[in-house]
Amino acid sequence: MKSFHHAMPALAFQTVDMLKLTMKFEHYDEPVRQNDKMDKDELLLSLLAENARMPVAELARRLSLSRTTVQARIERLERSKVISGYTLRRSAAAERAQIKGHVLITVKPKSASKTIGELTAMREVRTLHSVSGEVDLIAIVATSSVSALDRVIDRIGDLDGVERTQTSVILDTKVER
């Protein structure tokens, strides 16, 4: 009887703890259910990123929303600058024809701003990231040939503010969103 009596308070505390845990989960689940608007916006953005020319009627069908609602969402996202514009995306065949590389760049002290400006002016530099770690910048470079890539890497290495570069040629892109 003594062991049963001692077990009861522990069981009661476990039950109370489980109720608290359940209440906590219910509390966190509510905003997710109330946030369907944001979920639909994210899905809309994903569909537009996949194909910015997709007709509004098709977007509406895929989102299970009316055409008017989808059009209003797009206009709201444009006004709020979530969508800042629409851009050209090369075909998969055109992208595969490009020779691309990641160029890791270490910049000399106090040379970052000037170097970033010079890299930005190079049309072959598609993307430029400032990163933490042993290197300062990562440039994604695209050219029409290996020799053109080599020349761009040499031009980057010759910039006054560049201390060192290391390049990896991209063999294949598995996922790009």
Image (cartoon, rainbow, N blue to C red):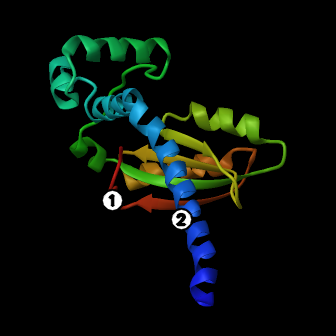
- Would you identify the image quadrant in which residue 106 lies? bottom right
Q: Left or right: 61 with respect to 149?
A: left
Residue 167: give x, y in percent of width and height: 54, 60
* Residue sitting at x 27%, y 14%: 69
Residue picked out by circle 1: 172
Mark 1 or 2, closer to the camera: 2
Identify the element where label 2 is drawn.
helix
Q: Dot 2: within a 10 Å radius of its alpha carbon, few (fewer than 14), some, or many (20 or more) residues? A: few
Above or below residue 14? Residue 61 is above
- Residue type, label 1: Asp
- Residue type, label 2: Thr
Q: Dot 1: within a 10 Å radius of its alpha carbon, few (fewer than 14), some, or many (20 or more) residues? A: few
Above or below residue 46? Residue 147 is below
Considering depth in this image, is 89 or 82 the residue closer to the camera? Answer: 82
Q: Left or right: 41 with respect to 69?
A: right
Residue picked out by circle 2: 15
- Decide which of tag 1 and tag 2 comes sooner along the chain: 2
Is the residue under label 2 in contact with that under label 1 (CB below 8 Å)?
no
Q: Furthest residue to the right?
A: 110
Residue 110: give x, y in percent of width and height: 84, 42
State how far apart marks 1 and 2 are (Cα).
Answer: 54 Å
Considering depth in this image, is 100 or 19 the residue closer to the camera? Answer: 19
- Would you identify the image quadrant in which residue 55 lies? top left
Considering depth in this image, is 48 or 16 the residue closer to the camera? Answer: 16
Considering depth in this image, is 12 or 70 the residue closer to the camera? Answer: 12
Residue 117: give x, y in percent of width and height: 67, 32
Q: Furthest residue to the front?
A: 1
* Residue sitting at x 41%, y 51%: 100
Above or below residue 46? Residue 15 is below
* Residue sitting at x 59%, y 44%: 129
* Residue sitting at x 26%, y 42%: 94
Identify the element where label 1 is drawn.
loop
